[in-house]
Amino acid sequence: MAGSTTQAVAPEALTSGARPRRVSSALHRALRWLGVVPFGVYVALGLIAPTVAITIAAFQDSTTGQFTMSNFSTAFHGTYLLGLKTSILLSIATAIVPGIFGLLIAYAIFTAKRGQWLRQVVITASGVFANFGGVPLAFLFIATLSTTGVVTGWIKDIFGVDIWNHGFTLYSAYGVFFVYLYFQIPLMVLIILPALEGLRPAWREAAQNMGAGTWQYWRYVGGPVLFPSFLGCLLLLFGSAFAAYATAEALTGGTIALTPIQIGALLNGNVVAGQENLGYALGVIMVVIIAIVMVGYTILQRRTARWLR
Amino acid sequence: MAAVADVEAGAQAPAPIARPAGRRRSYPVWRWVILLLAGLYFVIPLYAALRFAGLKAFPDIFKQAGFADAIELSLRLAVITTILTLVLMVPTTIYVHLRLPQIRRTMEGITILPIVIPPIVLIIGVLKVAPGFLLSTPYLLALVYVILAMPFAYRSLDAGLRAVDLKTLTEASNSLGAGWPTTLWRVVLPNIRTAMLSATVLTVALVLGEFTMASLALYVTFPVWIVQFEQNSGPVSVAASLLALFVTWLLLMVIVTVGGQGARKRGGAQVSLFTVTPPRETSHTTGEPE
């Protein structure tokens, strides 16, 4: 309250030279944090506490509850190591390809003049498709690309080739990759648009006034400004693909070796009873990988923030 | 500089592949190629599913056992999650903008976490720590969905608040004698109406589509029902997923169109999901409060 009135009178004069306030300034500073306490408590209970609980359980034996590293050593061997590798490679691929396509689509609708209608259709559709997944999404692609799918039939009719006889299968990592694009591209459109909006027309004008062509503008102005946010978005896409569970589970019936699928199987008790804590260990490994990705994201954000404010 | 940019380029959008002469009318080919390819990729599977389901499966959806209950639960969760999200995030975001602008980056970091922490990991953790009275009610899901909605909600609100000069507005309101409740309710909230709309829309879309957490927590929301029902009738199940997709999209279009019209009348920003585009005339002046 008091802070607000002083600001209302003359912000600079009082904040820089207000001597009498010094005494209570520590208390004041502490009180300012009160406003974010509800948010902090919610995050602590809903996000941090569950993560901590899983981490503790990951270091315990499933039956005796004793401290052990065996969950982690199992997690880094055999089929679970393969799952991690496949997950990471799949996530990298489903970050880069949709990243590029999403950027192009976002730029196309962003620069479309008189394109309000197009813009709204694409943006609302992106909001829906980015949250689309699981069994419904698997249905769509089974109807499209399975052995009896519509597109499979078209290719057979037009080219006389049955793609399923030539090594194509929907129920593998390649199939999952193709299906993931369906929610990754819209997600990219949603998250890259704010960055595109940060590109000021004035920069373009200035570049043109100095004689820069399109290529030079992108090489020396637009590209360097956009690149950090583009990379930041790629990292988010990586995280999103890495975390996806329902779609791959529905598409492959849980047979594909991806870490989230393996966690789901372990925790549903489908494999061997008493292996829940191995599932927790895999979860912790996922969180650690994501944490590494997040650190990269934060560093990139800091670089972007210089330009996009 | 702003005036020049607006007159010259006609929008906040920089001209794309621009030739200095006649670039206003240029509609580069690449844009249509990209949009066409994307359109095909997104529409063909929808068409294939529609053909598989057949049109006569649609009326059957509403007669199926459990359909009404599942829809009701999903809608209830959507409403509760949206209210909780707005009540938690709107005051927090406004407060951060006004009093703690230095932690905006930290907030961005925290609120991005739910997009990348695997939902399967989060839900097993929640099921592990949640107290018994919460475990026995499906509204536990609403509480967790608030976390899931945070990335979208925070970004929408943050963008909305950045587009208005919050400090000047609140100071003007205070010096005219309005107390904080009046300022918030009658000055700040109307100005971020579109941002709140975007947050709502994204939250609703998220709740109506979420499967992983609901299925692991063993509650039959609409997406879970679709999966369970697949064993009874494939076509009806596919028809139900298509219907859900179209209804959600239609809902979003209506909200965005109606909300956008209302906002334009008041000279506010234009609705787009995830971010709010500042109105054209003022995009350069109001876009940067600092």
Image: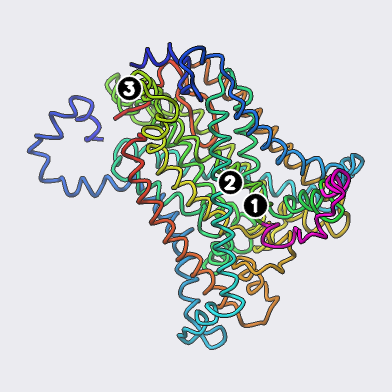
The chain carrying label 3 is B
The span shown in magenta is A152-176
Q: Which residue is mark 3?
A: B173
Amino acid at pointer 1: Tyr
Q: Residues within 10 Å of mark 2 (few under 14, many from 20)?
A: many
Label 2, label 1: how far apart the Cα atoms are: 9 Å
Q: Which residue is mark 2?
A: A98
Q: Which residue is mark 1?
A: A180
SS label for mark 1: helix
Q: Quadrant of the N terminus of chain B?
A: top left
The chain carrying label 2 is A
Query: What x and y, as percent, mark residue A130?
Result: 61, 44
Label 3, label 2: how far apart the Cα atoms are: 46 Å
Q: Are marks 2 and 1 in contact (CB under 8 Å)?
A: yes
At 16% from the left and 29% from the top, the residue drawn is A12
Q: Is residue A299 left or right of residue A280?
A: left
In front: A78, or A165?
A165
Amino acid at pointer 2: Pro
